[in-house]
């Protein structure tokens, strides 16, 4: 099996190194990841400036690694379009330090890299530790290895991927694996307003998450109960159930615009 | 009506200025937009450094405007959490120079800003010109005004928004308004590999779009036929139809992990 590994915490983060090492038992591991932390970059790609690539040495010489001065999505594109001689069998993004749950996946560089893999038609997985401190990456990597083998064996439908959040506990304290949906998450009090040493105002994004989803089968509830959450994700943002509703809106104005449709 | 306007081409771009001016006839217009071009930033938000805000003067003194040194999504968050005294009735992002069609909406700062509005529960619209040159922003702004009035009147279901692409033609040459779905788009030959003046390699994202969706009712087909495309978008990336499929995957390993589920 040929695997492409990336993350958004940067190529020198603990999570990606433990992950790559854990996956080497399954096949060929290639790491293409940002040269520094690129958290919360969402699905940003770099089009306004060029990108540079550097070889990086990992302790295990079987792992090839490249650092890119771009975003996680840039890394996947560069790896597939240029760096790798072959199309990977699986894209694995992580292990992220911190959860990627619910609506927050939209902001996540980790998840966006896996989405990029799915855009290329490659079975892809995003893996996050649902904690910022005392992250048990070795347990998470062990689960990742099992999951990646399973994904390679069974495949995933076109344009879908898996988003995995793992509670940071000992393996023996895990309560199970739960297939979930994304919960709705809203942040409140998002900005700290502060004054700099020269008396000027600046703002720093902060805030507390406010979950308003009452359902029990959502990702954040699972990890809170010490379960590994696996949420299947798709790429199609079309709200199909609104198409007919919008068709009866009557758009007109004076310039000869009308809503007749020569195609249908 | 109170409107919040942003974009990803930057606060001094033609598209946002023409849009803001066109919307002033509907009510109060507040512009909070990036201080420079932030194209293809996707749903990036800025968490690793602080943000600064500057007042900007628009020619029409009724329009209040602030420039932020962050992403389009940062602008929406800052506007709602801090700058505005009230929650806007509608968020309008655009008018973008260049299309935001199909899968590409995932990379779009313009669309992500409208998604941010929808996360806050505000009816939101992203508007793009399906051209890079000779953009007929005044026609587009005229349509935007009609659409925003309609959205304010009729509302949109929770956690949905509209993605609008407008062909750059004279109003009289418009073939109509078409409610579409997002088409699948894949880019090929994505990177130019070049050599810098010091002999080092760099990569610049480029490439051609390759549409592989055979359907006629997709956004890119509509604009190619001189129609305004309106695609309803939702925020829920959960692939519900995969949940049962994944539940029969049998996850286990030696540390006592099992897939029993104490919650259900």
Image: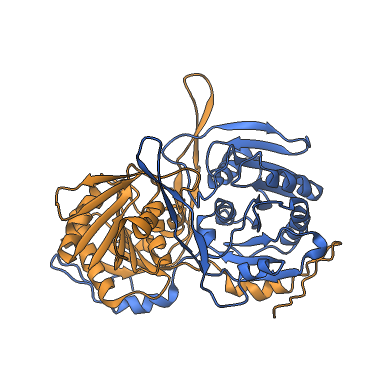
Chain colours: A blue, B orange
Query: Could you say which quadrant of the image residue B177 lies in?
Result: bottom left
Say whether residue B151 is left or right of residue A186: left
Q: Which is more toward the observer, A212 or B123? A: A212
Comparing A257 with A236, the one in front is A236
Side of B164 relative to B172 (left or right): right
Q: For the C terminus of chain A, which image quadrant? A: bottom left
Please, which residue is most extreme toward the top here? B198
Q: Where is residue A28 in the image (x, y as percent from the top left)?
A: 75, 44
Q: Can residue A161 be seen in this view?
A: yes
Is A262 or B13 nearer to us in this picture? B13
Q: Position of residue A249 (x, y in %)?
A: 27, 77
Number of numbered callouts drawn: 0
Q: Is residue A256 left or right of residue A123?
A: left
Above-or-below relation of B121 to B167 = below
Q: Which residue is drawn at 55% across and 55% down?
A: A119
Can residue B100 be spotted in the picture?
A: no
Q: Which residue is drawn at 23% across and 72% down?
A: A251
- Residue at the location (51% across, 73% down)? A212
Rendered view: B43 above or below A59: below
Q: Position of residue A183 (x, y in %)?
A: 55, 70
Say if A211 sits above or below A61 in the image: below
Residue B117 placed where, x, y %? 38, 63
């Amino acid at each position: 099996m040929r695997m492409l590994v990336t993350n958004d915490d940067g190529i020198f983060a603990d999570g990606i190194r433990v992950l790559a090492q854990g996956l080497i038992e399954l096949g060929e591991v290639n790491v293409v990841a940002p040269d520094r932390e690129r958290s919360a970059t969402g699905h940003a790609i770099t089009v306004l400036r060029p990108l540079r690539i550097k070889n990086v040495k990992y302790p295990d010489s079987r792992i090839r690694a490249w650092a890119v001065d771009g975003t996680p999505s840039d890394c996947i594109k560069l790896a597939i379009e240029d760096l790798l001689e072959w199309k990977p069998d699986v894209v694995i993004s992580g292990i992220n330090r911190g959860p990627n749950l619910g609506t927050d996946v939209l902001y996540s560089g980790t998840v966006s890299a896996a989405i990029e893999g799915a855009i290329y038609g490659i079975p892809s997985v995003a893996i996050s530790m649902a904690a910022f401190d005392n992250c048990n990456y070795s347990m998470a990597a062990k689960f990742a290895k099992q999951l990646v083998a399973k994904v390679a064996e069974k495949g995933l439908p076109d344009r879908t991927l898996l988003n995995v959040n793992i509670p940071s506990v000992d393996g023996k304290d895990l309560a199970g694996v739960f297939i979930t949906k994304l919960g709705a998450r809203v942040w409140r009090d998002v900005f700290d307003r502060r004054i700099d040493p020269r008396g000027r105002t600046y703002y720093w994004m902060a805030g507390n998450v406010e979950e308003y989803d009452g359902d029990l089968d959502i990702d954040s509830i699972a990890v809170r109960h010490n379960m590994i959450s696996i949420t299947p994700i798709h790429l199609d943002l079309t709200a199909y159930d609104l198409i007919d509703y919008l068709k009866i809106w009557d758009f007109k104005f004076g310039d000869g615009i009308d809503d007749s449709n020569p195609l249908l």
